[in-house]
Image: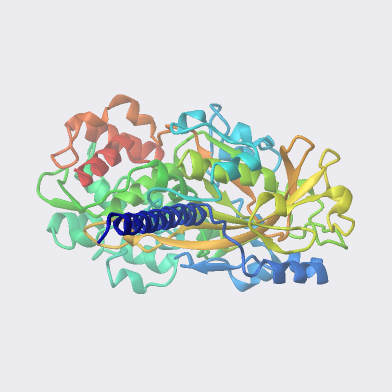
Amino acid sequence: MSRQSQAKVAARFNRWSIFISMTALAAAFASVADAASAKTARPVSPFIEQKWQDFQKDPVQFMNTLPPKKGSSPAAPGFSPADIKGRSFVTKKSQGRTPCDESGVCMQDILEGRAAARESAQDFFDLREFTAGTPIYRLDEMDAANLLQSNLPETPWSDTYWPLYMGGLGARYADGHFLTKGNWKGYYDFITSEDSSLKRIADNGDELDTLSPSEKYDLLIGDLTANGSVYENGYLTPFMWNEGKAYWDDKGEVEGWMGLCHGWAPAAYMAPRPTKTVETVSADGRSTLKFYPSDIKGLTTYLWAKARTPSRFIGGRCNDKDAKVDEESGRILDEKCFDTNPANWHTIIVNQIGVAKKSFVMDATYDYQVWNQPVYSYSYSYFNPKTGKAVSSLEEAKVELSDFRKDKFKKFRSRHAVAVVGIEMEVTYVVETRASHADYDSADRDAVSTVTYMYDIELDEDGNMIGGEWYHNAHPDFLWSPAAGARAESYGDSRVTATDWDGTSPLPAFWKDIAIQTALRTGLPLASIVEGLTAAANR
């Protein structure tokens, strides 16, 4: 081949190489662009347009429908059909609130006639929880931070709500004979019968494994005698049964919904999950007691239900079974019954779950199927409130109020609002399960449920979230959480330290004395003992 021919071939080869390189480079850029596009892809609701059309057609009816749910149902039997139809569940939910002392804002404050809840989402936050960032208050900044969805690293732990009609922590949940009794009186008679008495079982050493969490605790702290007195039914356990007895004596029943969910919900994320069974020695030294994860969870739940633990919360407290609504839109008129406004709700859930990675408790008064549930995750998408169209960007979802003539909520808008943005949010929260004798516990055993909320958020001329409207009257009522770092404890805990007991060896003698005094005086276990069991379960 001549040099000229070789030169032509080389030129063609070089041009082909450059073409291949350019093609490969373009493909690489396309791949990166596709990956970036996939990473920033925004969820779009496939059903929002139909919901919006239904709302436009009959807003009153749509506002009174329950938001859609999916997933596990709570283990609680819930309210009776009569309670639901007559809406008496609204007032019944006020029962069982934990009391509080002067330090901090506490759950008792939300009851009728007490201090109003905080109105600002900013006041809800405890900056000690925000170790990975600071709260974000603007919708566009949340959007830019890609916070349209988030979840906690692990679900708060599930367990039973320890119903009062079964004796609370006094329930022998693993005893098949106990479980057949049907109502509080049947369970109580079984427990207090001579054959089933705690002292007989403790003396004989049989059936120890079937005992309730409170009965195991009683055997851990004492030999059922103190100062010459005999406590055949224990120290802590009688308090479990006395709580239901007051309702039984008054009404001849203890309703199935009554329990300790207001203790379980905060305990599920404030206290560590006990992951395995702990074996320890009874106070008399004769028996080995097995505390299953459910037993330890139960004692923890009871502490958080009964101890005076300061909490922070936001939202109103409404006990009106028949709250008045606007005839045109179906919107609740009483602002106290309107509950948490959408701007506060959105700000709190995005920051708590998305930024702080810390759960909180939501209580939905107008939705009898949700009460005191710890939140696990959220995911939201946009819709245009004017057209009802599902959109993928914040700008497409924003509607200027000056151009929104058919706004159903026009007369309720803030005078500072200049635009609204449509939001549909899926919220997943943890629900109760049943106590068990499983030797191990993990997130795989937790149960969750998901609810979808539809609302819009009002923006002022600077783009700040200042309010909004719910498209269902069944929406989060008030939101609450114990103060950061709070500890549920009893009065005897100031006299002991958790490091003095490893959770498996016999309790120190002075611990037993303090634990017995605390149980007999207040009906509470020592937090130090419960924490010792939890630590042993996680070693």
Q: Picture quarter containing residue 294?
A: bottom left
The figure's colour scheme reads rainbow
> Can residue 128 be seen by looking at this rendering?
yes
Q: Position of residue 92 (x, y in %)?
A: 62, 57
**Identity of the residue drawn at 28% across and 65% down:** 174
**Nearest to the observer: residue 195 or residue 426:** 426
Pick the front one: 406 or 437 = 406
Q: Is residue 239 above or below residue 137?
A: below
Please name the residue shown 40% across and 55% down the image. 15
What residue lies at 60% left-to-right and 68% top-to-bottom?
68
Position of the N terminus by quadrant: bottom left
Residue 510: which quarter of the image?
top left
Picture quarter with the C terminus:
top left
Please tell me which residue lies in front, 239 or 355. Answer: 355
Kindly tell me whether residue 337 is visible in this rendering. no
User: Which residue is situated farthest in the left direction here?
Assistant: 286
Q: Give the x, y percent position of residue 519.
A: 34, 40
- Name the spot of residue 211 as percent of width and height, x first: 25, 58
Q: Residue at x 79, y 37 (%)?
A: 461
Q: Nearer the viewer, residue 46 or 249?
A: 46
**For residue 341, side relative to residue 160 (left or right):** right
